[in-house]
Amino acid sequence: MEINEQLKRIKEEIDTFFSVAADEVDKFRLKYLGKKGIITCMFDDIRTIAPEQRKEFGKNVNDLKTQALSKIEQLNQIIENNKVQSIDALDLSRPANSIALGSRHPIAKVTHNICQAFEKIGFTVAEGPEIEDDWHNFESLNFPPEHPARDMQDTFFISENPDIVLRTHTSSIQVRVMENNHPPIRVICPGRVFRNEAITARAHCIFHQIEGLYIDKNVSFADMKQTLLYFVKEMFGSHVSIRLRPSYFPFTEPSAEMDISCDICGGKGCNLCKYSGWVEILGCGMVDPNVLENMNINPDEYSGFAFGMGIERITQQIYKTKDIRLFFENDIRFLSQFKAI
Ligand code: DAH
């Protein structure tokens, strides 16, 4: 092999060598710089080189030696740094460094608990899209175009297409469930909803709801009341009571709003219940026959009830959090308080 090429190849070999095993590094040292090492032998060869090339060859071999030595030093340094202390120097009784654990978001936790309470009595969980069309969010639920009840929900529309909305409530999911299933139907539908509201301590433009729907033969208002009472006792404890107030929703007839006795003041009256002793937690009612007909379910054969609740409101009641914005800021100082739940 031509001498310059040989020098080049050795230079490359030294360059690319890497090991942090001490015996490998020593083998490397012997291979190049040992008594019969490659570089050592090259020094002996100098005599055989033509006098006019000797100077340059000598310089090149010297450079290789410097390169190999610095490689060995560098690898030995790494080995030294990596060396584990001897077992005697370790304090085995020293407590381990603590590992920071994450925690579940309180909204996720409460959503899970609500679903679980209903799953115990035979409901299944269904989900639906956050971007909806007018039919699923409004029209099928008995909100005809221009109906004043549409104004109750400050809807986000998409400017290019007024048919597309960000869903204002999870009631749109009950429509999708009825479209795709025959009664009996028992579902619970959690999800995020959107309304064009100013963000304050009490309101947010994004929040969470859970919708419930039960359709079968001979389902009555009494069934609804008993189901909701079961849910409240399961969720808040058996000491909490409920009351129903007449209300209006286009998709239920009759409609009601349900309050629970305030768990913060025990019904005596406080800031959170506005000194009434009661906190509203959901809207409910018997599914309007028009809605059933829209879904090709015969209202003479089937009846049902539906309900919808805001999860933030319930979470606030459970954990006594006053400001709804805390749920959306992801401030670790707030979230880490929920580790134990
Ligand atoms: N969709 C209603 C809202 O967002 C809540 C609601 C009320 C849902 C009554 C229902 C119901 O299913 O029957 O305010």
Image (cartoon, rainbow, N blue to C red):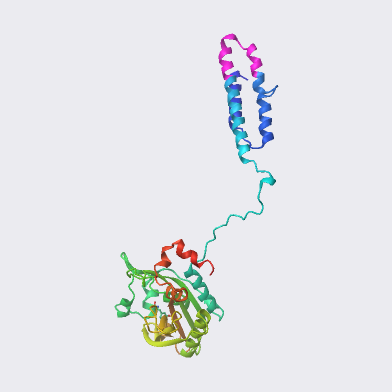
The x and y percentages for residue 186 are 51, 80
**Does residue 183 appear in the picture of this structure?**
no
Q: Residue at x 41, y 81 (%)?
A: 279
Give the quarter of the image for residue 74. Answer: top right
**Does residue 24 appear in the picture of this structure?**
yes
Residue closest to the eye, 110 or 164: 110
The x and y percentages for residue 148 are 30, 80
* Tag count: 0
Q: Residue at x 61, y 27 (%)?
A: 69
Q: Which residues are magenta?
A: 42-60
Establish if 333 lies above or below 276: above
The x and y percentages for residue 37 are 68, 23
Q: Residue at x 41, y 63 (%)?
A: 329
Is 235 left, or right, of 68 in this rendering?
left
Is 68 left, or right, of 106 in this rendering?
right
The x and y percentages for residue 315 are 46, 74
Q: Residue at x 66, y 24 (%)?
A: 33
**Image quarter of the N terminus:** top right
- What secondary structure characterizes most of the magenta part? helix
Establish if 45 lies above or below 259: above
Q: Is residue 59 magenta?
A: yes
Establish if 119 lies above or below 166: below
Is 6 left, or right, of 161 in this rendering?
right
Residue closest to the eye, 91 or 188: 91
Of the four image quadrants, the one with ligand 1 is bottom left
